[in-house]
Amino acid sequence: MNFIRKTLATTGCQLYNTFFHPKFYTSVLLVLMAVFIQIKPYAEVANDFNIDVNFGIYSLLYSDALFVTVFFISLLLIFSELPFKNAQQIFLLTRSGRRAWCVSQIFYIVVISVFITLAAMLFTMLLLAGNLTFDNSWDKVIISAAYQKLPTEYETVLFVSPETLVVFTPHRAILWSTLCGILCSITFGLIIFAANLASNTSLGVLLGSVLISAYWLFLYTDKYFLIWFSPLEWASVNTINLKHNSQMPTPEFAISALFAICVFSVITILFCSRKGSKTV
């Protein structure tokens, strides 16, 4: 219990410092701007024709290259400082111990990942306020966008696959994109933290940058093969092979792979946090 208390107290201090740091607000603002760019055209259609847009549209954000790129660049900015090395860390290390100090930063990654995901969800709801529905059937706006039947004056930039609308219901799409999106974010953060901690350099930042670059590279190459090595795409409902009838990654593979990476990263962090480690 004492270990848990110290870990949670240290996590609270780390979060408090982050929530008052300009870099954090800049990162969140970037994510909200990406949401605005993708959702605003649909909100305009809904307002002009007085029709509803299903909240399932949020799940389609993870299928958009701009949103995914901005989202993970924002996380890279926030997680790049892990493990924290500011002046306050000496005090926190002394009070909590090395192990609790490292575990607190794992909790920190989880909280930040959930917070930014919820911020994107709430901002989507705000943009569609007055025309938002939570029904479990796709609305006319999204269906029309999928079949490219919206009026030409409305420039929609959010890609909607007709097949996705058949395979996924809105509720199922939201569940997958939200949960897998959070897991991808946590995995991304743990990779950065573990690599930075183990190398005592900014190796994790480099790895995070490689993952984002690889995501863009795989978009313009043989996706059906390389997409299995691009975890940033696995939260996309246009990508995941829910019915096991294509060459795309299956949900079982995506979840298993992400959990395996998380476990390996946590083991690395705990190993580096052992007493006497020179990396902390």
Image (cartoon, rainbow, N blue to C red):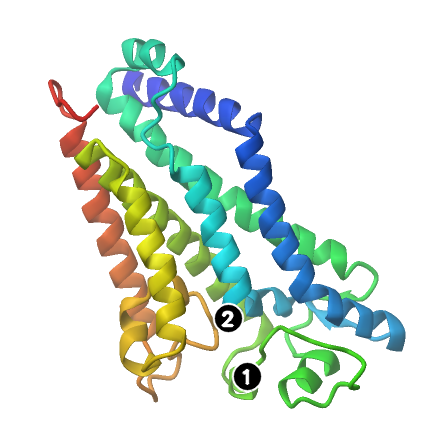
Q: Amino acid at mark 1?
A: Ser
Q: Nearer the viewer, residue 229 or 100?
A: 229
Which residue matches tag 1?
161
Q: Are marks 2 and 1 in contact (CB under 8 Å)?
A: yes
Question: Which label number is shown at residue 63?
Answer: 2
Query: Around disc 1, counting alpha carbons within 10 Å, would you say few (fewer than 14), some (14 to 19), or many (20 or more)?
Result: some
Give the side of residue 59 with respect to residue 220, left or right.
Answer: right
Q: Amino acid at mark 2?
A: Ser
3D distance between C-alphas at marks 2 and 1: 9 Å
Relative vertical location of residue 162 with respect to residue 212 in this rendering, above or below:
below
> Residue at the location (31% across, 56% down)?
210
> Residue at the location (39% across, 20% down)?
10
User: Can residue 234 be seen from the camera position used here?
Assistant: no
**Label 2 SS:** helix
> Residue at the location (73% across, 77% down)?
155
Give the side of residue 133 with respect to residue 73, left or right.
Answer: right
